[in-house]
Image (tube, rainbow, N blue to C red):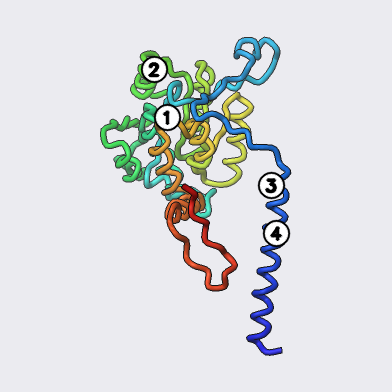
């Protein structure tokens, strides 16, 4: 059998298989009930059981972080400290997550606090990309106190936000996870805050530190989260007005998802590339 004949038969066989699958799908679709579509005016529902009642019953209380009840802390994301991060495949991956988290906070208008530890020495200044996201935010320059929540100036700033706005949920990230995140987390839990350490925006010197810290803060009552899952939780509904601003960091900083989005919208409502084999059919024109 010649190569040309074999190729022709292979294409023909593929056409038959695709055609048969299309027929089966069409038959299946014909026996299915009509789809039930949620109204585009629908709103997010809270759990049926109120928080107080859930606590009384000994149930978990899903008192989730929202743009209205949260403040976000960026602790010591300094160029000198970041160079020692060892629990990521690359520092570019880690930096990508930190910048994405910052952009989500900005998109949702969540108040943020930035702080550094002895930036005048070997720790270095905050990431330039982080400062660029928040050009109008002051940096709280700690001069020796390791636990940011134990620093009088930084704590005063956080308490002012909490008092004025009633925000009780703290989303925290930093370098390192075991020090700059864990210590303030434990302190804030004692003072009644709900705390969400963002694990993949908080680097460590090694895997053991990461594992030990996650266990420690979880046992204390904190709820570890990850950047992009947290962003989805904060957005809650893609019909909310922040959707476009929130989608941009997803596309830019989560490239796997970004390629899916761009591929769809680059080809939406336009004629696809013609298939010279005739296997992929062009969509039929809409009836008038």
Determine whether 77 is above or below 10 in the image: above
| Residue at the outermost left position | 136
Image location of residue 222, percent across then percent down: 57, 27
Residue 118 appears left or right of 49: left
- Tag nearer the camera, 3 or 2: 3
Q: Earlier in the sequence, mark 1 or mark 3?
A: 3
Mark 4: which secondary structure? helix
Q: Earlier in the sequence, mark 4 or mark 3?
A: 4
Callout 3: few (<14), some (14-19), or many (20+) C-alpha neighbours within 10 Å? Answer: few
Q: Earlier in the sequence, mark 4 or mark 1?
A: 4
Calculate the distance from the C-alpha at mark 4 to the C-alpha at mark 3.
Answer: 12 Å
Report which residue position mark 3 lands on. 29
Image location of residue 88, percent across then percent down: 52, 50
Calculate the distance from the C-alpha at mark 3 to the C-alpha at mark 2.
Answer: 57 Å
Callout 4: few (<14), some (14-19), or many (20+) C-alpha neighbours within 10 Å? Answer: few
Residue in the picture at 47% in, 65% down: 273
Mark 2: which secondary structure? helix
Report which residue position mark 2 lands on. 159
Calculate the distance from the C-alpha at mark 2 to the C-alpha at mark 4.
Answer: 62 Å
Residue in the picture at 51% in, 38% down: 177
Q: Which mark is residue 72?
A: 1
Report which residue position mark 4 lands on. 21
* Label 2 close to label 4 by CB (< 8 Å): no
């Amino acid at each position: 059998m010649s190569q040309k004949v074999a190729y022709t038969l292979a294409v023909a066989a593929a056409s038959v298989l695709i055609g048969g699958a299309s027929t089966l799908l069409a038959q299946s679709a014909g026996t299915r009930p009509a789809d039930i579509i949620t109204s585009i005016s629908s709103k997010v529902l809270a759990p049926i059981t109120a928080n107080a009642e859930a606590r009384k019953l000994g149930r978990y209380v899903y008192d989730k972080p929202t743009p209205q009840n949260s403040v976000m802390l960026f602790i010591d994301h300094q160029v000198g400290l970041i160079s020692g991060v060892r629990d990521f495949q690359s520092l570019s991956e880690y930096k990508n997550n930190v910048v994405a988290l910052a952009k989500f906070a900005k998109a949702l208008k969540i108040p943020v606090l930035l702080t550094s530890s002895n930036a005048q020495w070997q720790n270095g200044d905050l990431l330039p990309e982080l400062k660029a996201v928040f050009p109008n935010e002051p940096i709280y320059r700690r001069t020796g106190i390791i636990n940011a929540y134990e620093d009088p100036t930084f704590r005063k700033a956080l308490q002012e936000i909490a008092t004025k706005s009633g925000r009780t949920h703290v989303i925290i990230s930093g370098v390192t996870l075991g020090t700059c995140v864990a210590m303030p987390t434990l302190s804030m839990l004692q003072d009644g805050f709900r705390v969400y350490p963002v694990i993949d925006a908080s680097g460590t010197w090694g895997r053991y530190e990461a594992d030990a810290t996650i266990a420690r803060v979880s046992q204390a009552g904190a709820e570890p989260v990850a950047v992009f899952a947290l962003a989805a939780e904060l957005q809650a509904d893609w019909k909310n007005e922040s959707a476009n601003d929130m989608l941009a960091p997803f596309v830019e900083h989560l490239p796997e998802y970004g390629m899916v989005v761009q591929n769809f919208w680059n080809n939406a409502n336009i004629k696809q590339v013609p298939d010279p084999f005739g296997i992929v059919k062009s969509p039929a024109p809409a009836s008038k």
